[in-house]
Image: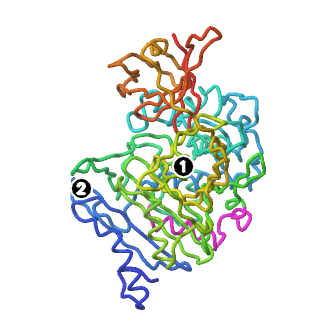
Amino acid sequence: MVCSSCPNTSPKSALLTQQLNALFEKWNQNTPGGVLTVAQNGQIIYNKAFGMADLEHDIPNTTNTIFESGSVAKQFTAAAILLLVLDKKLSLEDDVRKYLPELPNYGQKITIDHLLHHTSGLRDWGAIATISGWERGKRVYTQADALDIICRQKSLNFPPGDQFSYSNSNYNLLAILVERVSKESFAEFTRKRIFKLMEMHHTSWRDNYRSVVKNRAIAYTKSGNNYLATMPFENAHGNGGLLTTTTDLIRWTRNFRTLQLKGAAFTKLQVQCGKLNNGLAIAYAGGFFIRNYTDVLEFSHGGYTAGYRAWLAYYPNQDISVAYLSNDGNVSPEKMGAQIAEIVLDKKLETPIGKTIPLGRSVLQPHTGRYKNLRNDELFELELKEEKLRLKSGQVLHATAPNIFHWGANRMIFTKDLQQVTVYTGNGDSATYERKMPFLPAANELPPYLGTYRSTEAETSLLIELHNGSLRTFVKPAGYFLLTPIYKDAFITTNNSLLQFTRNKKGAVTGFTMSVARARGVWFEKG
C-alpha cells in the first residue's frame, strides 16, 4: 500500500502529493480542516489529515477522525432499499403507501423508484420547516417529526415522475420503509448488511445526536474572524446523518470492483439512472449522480450538514476513488472535489458544449430579466455584468449561438422573441420559462395584501403589514422580511421566498402560495 506519509515512489507521485497538499495549505492548528483519501486500483495513494478536529481542546484531525457526511449518506440508504429488492421483500414499482399508509393519497401513485431518484414530487420537509420559521438547526427534529411534516402536505411539487427535484423527504421515507419491511432498526439493518460486510468499522448513523462518538470532529463555520461550533442536533436520518471516515468510504467504493454486496445484480441496480415520464433519463442513480465529462465518467455526491462537508467520487474507467470529509463549513465540497479530481486524473473536468462565440452588449441585453417556470413557481433572473450574461447567482453563461447559452452541463435555448426560454439541466431534466414583466404597485394598491395568513401545511401564520411604504412579513421566530414586488400579485422576500397572491371573482385577496427551494405552492389562507 502506498500513502502520502510513505516515501514517494516516483516523481509523478511526489508531484501528486505536492499538488494535493497545496489545496489544504490554509488549514492549520488554528482552523478546522479535514481528511482526504485517494485510492487507485484498490491501493491508497494519498491519505492525509489537515487542521483541527476540536479547536476548544487543541485536538488535531487525523486520518481516523470521524466526520458527518451529509447527503453522501443517501447512497447507503439507497443500498439498503436495493438489498431488500434483491431479497424480493419489495419492488421498486411498489406504491410507497403500501408501506407508509399515513402518506396522503395525492391521486397519483408514488413508487419507491420515485423516492430513490428524487422524482416523487414530495416537498422537502426541511424547506417546510424553514417556512414555519424553525429551519433545521434551530430545533431538534426526529424521524417522527419529518414524517409528520411530510404527511401534512396537501399537494406535491409536481406529478410523480414528471421532474427531478432533490428532496430529503424521499430518503427519510426510504429509511423508515427499510425499518418497516425488515422489522429491524435502520441502523441495525445497515450495520449487518452493509457496514460489517464492507469492513466499515468506524461507520454508524447519527440517530441520537446526544450519543458520544469517539474521535468525532466538531464542525465549525466562520463568522468574521472567528469560528463558531455548528453541530447538527437532530435525529432525522437516512437523508443524511452518516458518521464515517474517509477510509471507510474508500472501502465502500471498492464494491464497484469486488461486487461483495449481492454481486453484479446489486451494482446494476445501483448505477441505474432514473427516468421521467417523458422517457428522458436523469443523472441521479442509487444515491449519487452519474456525470459524463470529456473522457471521464464520474459517480459522485456532495454532502452538507451543519458545519460538516463531504465529497465522495468514483471514476470507474480509471478505478480511482476520492473521499473527502471536512469540519469546515465554509468549504464547497463540489468545488473541492473538482479540484482534487483534476489533480488526480491529470485532466480538466469539462462538459463538451461546442464552440463558444462572443456576443456584444446589444445582443446580450435583451436576454436579461426575470423568468418563471411554466410548471411551477420556480424563478431565475439574468443580468448583464462586466459585459457578460450571468445568472443572478453569479454563473457566467457562454453562448454557442445568439440564443443558445451554456453553463456547466446546463443549456438554455431562447425563443426568437425572447419571451420564453427552455432550460435543459445536467440532471437530464428540462423546463420552459416565460418572461415576467416588472410590477411596481402604487401605494393605494398595497392595503389589500395586508392581514394575517395561516397555513396548516407549515403549521404557522404570517402577518403582512406596511412599513415605510413597503410590505413586510413577520415570521416567528425568524423575524421580519421585506416583500419586493416582481410581477402582478407576486412578491419575493428578503429570504428568497416567493409569495403569489390569489384573488376571488370580486378581486379580493384570499390568500397566497409560498414557494421556496424544494417546496412549491404551500398554501396560506387569509384570516
- Main secondary structure type of the part rendered in magenta: helix
Stretch in magenta: 245-268
273 relative to 318 in the view: left or right: right
In reply to whether residue 258 is colored magenta, the answer given is: yes
Q: CA distance from mark 1 to mark 2?
A: 30 Å
Q: What residue would you read off at disc 1?
A: 187
Does residue 258 lie above or below 510 as drawn? below
The residue depicted at 55 percent of the width and 53 percent of the height is 363
Are the residues at dot 1 and dot 2 in contact (C-beta closer than 8 Å)?
no
Q: Amino acid at mark 2?
A: Leu
Q: Is residue 428 left or right of residue 225?
A: right
Of tags 1 and 2, the one toward the viewer is 2
Q: Secondary structure at mark 2?
A: loop
For residue 55, which numbered disc appears in the image? Answer: 2
Instruction: Give the x, y percent position of residue 256.
Output: 63, 69
* In magenta segment, residue 2: no
